[in-house]
Image: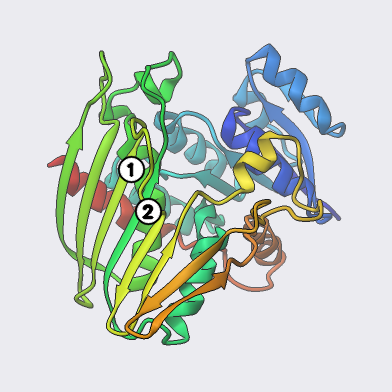
């Protein structure tokens, strides 16, 4: 039987990420999509088996669901997830899990007490450049890593009326809440827990209510220093990754291609999905020269492949929700809470 899935929210998260990924796995069936936006409702017609609904309560009161995916504005995540847990429906929550670590931890506790699977969509663990970097580190190519520089930047100098631009930090607004969960999670996955946090959070755009140009420096228990940049106001970008080890330096440029490919209408099972069309590579440089390293294909659909197995009792969930709680604790430290 198919895993009958409802998606709450059909903005970038639902339309560009979750729906195409879920539809690419034959074990899942999208049976409901929640959106109030008429244009997004029209886009949902791509998924013929899905009923398009305006009210999330109509979905959460159904008794025929095997999974709910929550990808609505950040401040709604916890309340909707709590409702799904109460209905005994396994739930995927887009990052961040909540707008505070206390809120997120309470969700984790409720899900555990109810025996309901709860996981968080940390899809950037399956970016092609991150997979490539992880392999190089695991193979010892860089030696002992000392510095991890990671940047996720774009150029959007004018505010919009989207909730990501209008929400205050207490409601999960700002680029630290938007991109920080990804960059922090990647750093924690590679180098372990953090013992010190330094933050520089700036508002560059006229009328900004939340940070839009931010920097974190994390000191890991392992001794590695992670330096994380995130910005909506960068006219040109730093390297996506620059990782300094005792033997070599890894450098890659540009963001993973899966998001723009999906926006352009390509789908996860299409040839070349997850691979840069320009054939770009990463580089390894050291005292004896420099060479190119092919980038592995990105595979965000691996999240749902692992989740599908977990929901039928075959393996663990793709992301431990406590990882997301730890990420929120680091964000709160950066915000001075």
Where does the image place residue 141, in percent across and percent down from the top left?
Answer: 43, 84
Q: Which residue is mark 2?
A: 183
Residue at 70%, 30% in the rendered image? 33
Element at badge 1? Answer: strand
Q: Quadrant of residue 286?
A: bottom left
Do tag 1 and tag 2 residues touch (Cβ < 8 Å)? yes
Query: Can you say whether 176 is above or below 241 in the image?
Result: above
Q: Give how far across and how far down residue 185 sits, in percent.
A: 38, 58
Along the horizontal axis of the image, is 194 left or right of 33? left
> Observer-nearest residue: 2 or 15?
15
**Residue 92 % position (x, y):** 56, 48
For residue 247, above or below residue 163? below
Secondary structure under the numbered disc 2 in the rendered image: helix
Q: Residue at x 55, y 51 (%)?
A: 256
Please say whether residue 99 is visible from this viewpoint: no
At horizontal 29% and vertical 53% (from top left) the residue drawn is: 228
Nearest the camera: 79 or 113?
79
Sequence-wise, which precedes: disc 1 or disc 2?
2
The answer to whether 10 is drawn above or below residue 245 in the figure is above
**What residue is pinned by disc 1?**
230
């Amino acid at each position: 039987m198919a895993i009958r899935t409802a998606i709450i929210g059909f903005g970038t998260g639902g339309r560009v990420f979750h729906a195409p990924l879920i539809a690419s796995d034959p074990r899942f069936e999208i049976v409901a999509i929640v959106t109030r936006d008429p244009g997004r409702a029209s886009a949902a017609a791509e998924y013929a088996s899905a009923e398009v609904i305006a009210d999330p309560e109509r979905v959460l009161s159904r008794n025929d669901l095997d999974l709910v995916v929550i990808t609505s504005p950040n401040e709604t995540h916890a309340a909707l997830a709590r409702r799904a847990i109460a209905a005994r429906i396994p739930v995927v929550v887009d990052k961040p899990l909540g707008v505070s670590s206390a809120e997120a931890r309470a969700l984790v506790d409720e899900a555990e007490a109810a025996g309901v699977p709860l996981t968080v969509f940390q899809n950037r663990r399956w970016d092609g450049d991150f997979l490539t970097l992880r392999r190089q580190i695991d193979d010892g190519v860089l030696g002992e890593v000392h510095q991890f520089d990671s940047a996720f930047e774009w150029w959007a100098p004018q505010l919009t009326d989207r909730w990501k631009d209008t929400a205050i930090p207490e409601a999960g607004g700002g680029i630290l809440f938007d991109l920080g969960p990804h960059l922090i999670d990647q750093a924690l996955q590679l180098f372990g827990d953090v013992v010190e946090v330094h933050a520089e959070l700036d508002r560059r755009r006229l009328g900004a209510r939340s940070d839009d140009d931010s920097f974190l420096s994390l000191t890991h228990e392992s001794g590695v220093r992670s330096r994380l940049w995130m910005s909506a106001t960068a006219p040109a970008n730093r390297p996506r990754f620059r990782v300094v080890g005792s033997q070599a330096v890894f450098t890659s440029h540009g963001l993973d291609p899966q998001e723009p490919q999906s926006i352009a209408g390509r789908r996860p099972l299409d040839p070349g999905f997850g691979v840069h069309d320009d054939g770009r590579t990463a580089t390894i440089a050291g005292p004896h020269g420099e060479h190119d390293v092919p980038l592995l294909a990105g595979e965000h659909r691996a999240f749902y492949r692992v989740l599908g197995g977990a929901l039928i009792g075959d393996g663990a969930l793709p992301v431990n929700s406590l990882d997301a709680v730890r990420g929120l604790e680091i964000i709160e430290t950066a915000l001075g809470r």
